[in-house]
Structure formats: structure tokens, C-alpha cells
Amino acid sequence: MKSEEQLAESIERFQEVFWEKRSTGRPPVGVVNRDVFLPIKYLHAPFERSEVTPEGVNRKSVTTDYEFGFAAPAVTCDDWIPYSAPWRAIPWLEACCGCPVRYSSGSLCPEHFVSSLEALDKVAIPADNGWFRCMERQTEQLVASAPADCWISPSILRGPSDVVAAMRGQSEFFVDLHDDPGAIDRAAACVNRLLLDALDMHFHCVEPKRGGFGHIYGYWAPEKTVVIQEDAMGMCSPAVYRDVFQKYNAEVVEHFGKCVLFHLHSTGFQHYRHVLDTPGIAGLEFTVEMGGPPLPELVPVLREILERSRLILMVDHGFEHLPEVLGQLPREGLYVVAYDTDIPNNETYRQFVAAKWKS
């Protein structure tokens, strides 16, 4: 468990250097167990059937985020803000829209169920299948049992493009965007209303803690916060994001205010400038992965993001290049996340931070 003093120092760092973009100290640096991003590992025992139902997802079947990754972390002196969220292995919005949740050994995924564009216009969103209430029930239970150093975060809630792609199937979705973007747009509007309802439900259940809110990327925010995403747009022209989906992200920002960020992968981020153009967007979470450009080649993009906004730099791949890259980036508006396989203990953490930021 993190101490009161340590949490206060980290929150001050998030407030001043990340949110207020001041040069008063070093940026926050969080260290996290890589397996936290494989929440299927939280499952206590395999499901007996291939389709998961809301009744099968409960505290008896699944470990919480806090219990799995944050009760006894390898690094305890970092800035990571511990959290729990409704089980992130469930594709919540996809399930709430009617996608069956399929289970096989080691994975959960939504199954597409809408057979045509014509059928897409007739789908009831949300579906009356119990998944929304399941997410609400998990949120309430986590709030009631949260340890003193644990914030309750929204779960992974994918954006309209991702959810409609899950409903139709990826290949059909991309063909639909070409054949009838208006039908996709209408469905996206319904999904975005559901996303807003899910976030409203969350923040109805979750009160501020230490003057703010936590998130699954391990940061503290002074106001209601969420990281939205449109991963399907990594396969499309940036113009598709701008013309069809950006307005729905703008609705989320308008609804929740100045602490809404956007998630990107280095393997598909070509729409990032349009995301930065979204009025009021707080910044970008950028996950550097194998298969995308090497981290040093991303420096111009990362600098541009920091010059225009804020950046959560999630180093999934290429940690060996991080020291040289950080030397080329401003600290104001930056938050860095690394894995405990790269920074395995407190001494390594202190050395890493001291080498990069002397003040």
C-alpha cells in the first residue's frame, strides 16, 4: 500500500507537471506489471461454456485489478496511481450493444452478430441483456471495498468505430464505410450515447478521492477523466476519422470537460493530428508497440503532441531507447509508463529518474 506522503507527492506531480504543464519538477513516471494488461489472467477458473453471461462475472470468479497488480508491486516509490475497474477482459460496450461474449482458453472477445447494413439500422442499442447492469454492479462493489490507496476507474470502453466494427465484423465494417458511411454514422451515434450513459453511470457511483479521479493508465486527474479510443481508425484514412467519428469524440469532451484523453497505438496513429484538433481534448495516450516505428523515429511526433497538448507515453516496446528519447522531449505535459520487467525495483527506478531529470 502506498503511503499518504507518497500519494500526495505523486498527485502534486500530476497536477503541476502533467495537467498544468509547469516546469516545477520532473514529470510523473509510473511502473506497472505487464500482466495487468492481460486481464484474462484475473479469472480464477475457466468458464464452463463458450459464451459468457453477466451472471458469470462476479467477485467469486475474478480477481480485482488492485489485488492482482497493486497490493504488492515490485516498485513502490513510483507515481503509478493504483486502481480497480470492472473486469477489463469483458468487451463492455460491445456486449451492451448485443455482441455475444465468447470465451476460449486464454481469451475473451465479442462475436459479430449484425448480418447486414440494413439490419444495423434496426439493432436496439443498448440491448436488453443484463450487461450494463453487470458493469454498474461491479462498479458499486469496487467502490464499497476500495483500499485507501485505490481509485475506481472506468473500465475499457471502446469508441463507436470499434464497437460498430465488433457488431458487424472487421472486414464487413471497412466495406460498409466505403459503401454506406451514413449507416455507420447512424450506428456510431447510438453507440456514443451508450458510451456517455456508461460514463455517467460510473461517475454517479464514483466520488472524487484526494481531490480527483484515477484511471487504468495509472494517473490522477483533478476532474472526471477517461481515455477514449477509436482503434479501428488505425486501418483507415485519417479523413474517415475526421468526417465520421471525430464529432462523437468531441461530444465526450464537451460532456466531461478538460480531462478527456485519447488512446493511440504506434502501429496505427495516422489520425493523431485530427484527434489533437478535437476542441478541448486534454492530450494523447501513445502506446509504443512492436510492429510500429522504432521509438527514436517517433520523437518528432511525440514533440508535436507535447507542444500542442499532453502526452502519456506508454513504452510497451523499445525501453532501451527511452533514455535518449526523453532527452529530446519537454517535461511539461508528459507522463511516462514503463513495465516492471524494465524497471524491476525501487533502486533501478531512482537511478532512472535521477539520470533523466536532475530537478
Image: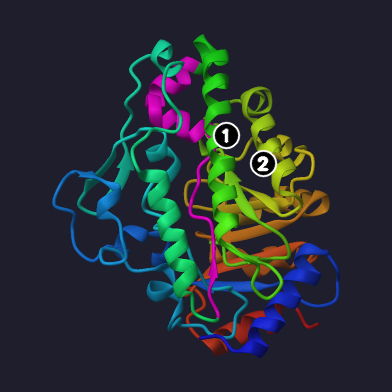
**Residues at marks 1 and 2, CA–CA distance in whole angstroms:** 8 Å
Task: Give how far across and how far down residue 16 sits, in percent.
Answer: 81, 71
Confirm whether the magenta stretch covers residue 350. Answer: no
Label 2 crowding class (10 Å Cα cut-off): few <14, some 14-19, many 20+? some
Colouring method of the image = rainbow
* Residue extending farthest left: 48
State whether residue 27 appears in this view.
no
Of 100 and 36, which appears nearest the observer? 100
Earlier in the chain: of badge 1 and badge 2, it is 1
Occupied quadrant, residue 64: bottom left
Kindly check if marks 1 and 2 are in contact, taking CB atoms under 8 A apart as contact.
Answer: yes
Q: Residue at x 59, y 85 (%)?
A: 77
Task: Give how far across and how far down residue 130 sits, in percent.
Answer: 35, 43
Of 213 and 273, which appears nearest the observer? 213
Occupied quadrant, residue 94: top left
Residue that badge 1 annotates: 192
Label 1 crowding class (10 Å Cα cut-off): few <14, some 14-19, many 20+? many
What residue span does the magenta drawing correspond to? 149-176
Q: Residue at x 47, y 71 (%)?
A: 144
Asked if residue 317 is positioned above or below residue 349 in the image, the reply reads above
What amino acid is labelled 1 in the image? Asn
Judged left or right of residue 116, residue 251 is: right
Q: Residue at x 26, y 46 (%)?
A: 53
For mark 2, give the secondary structure.
helix
What amino acid is labelled 2 in the image? Val
Of 29 and 222, which appears nearest the observer? 222
Which mark, by number, is residue 252? 2
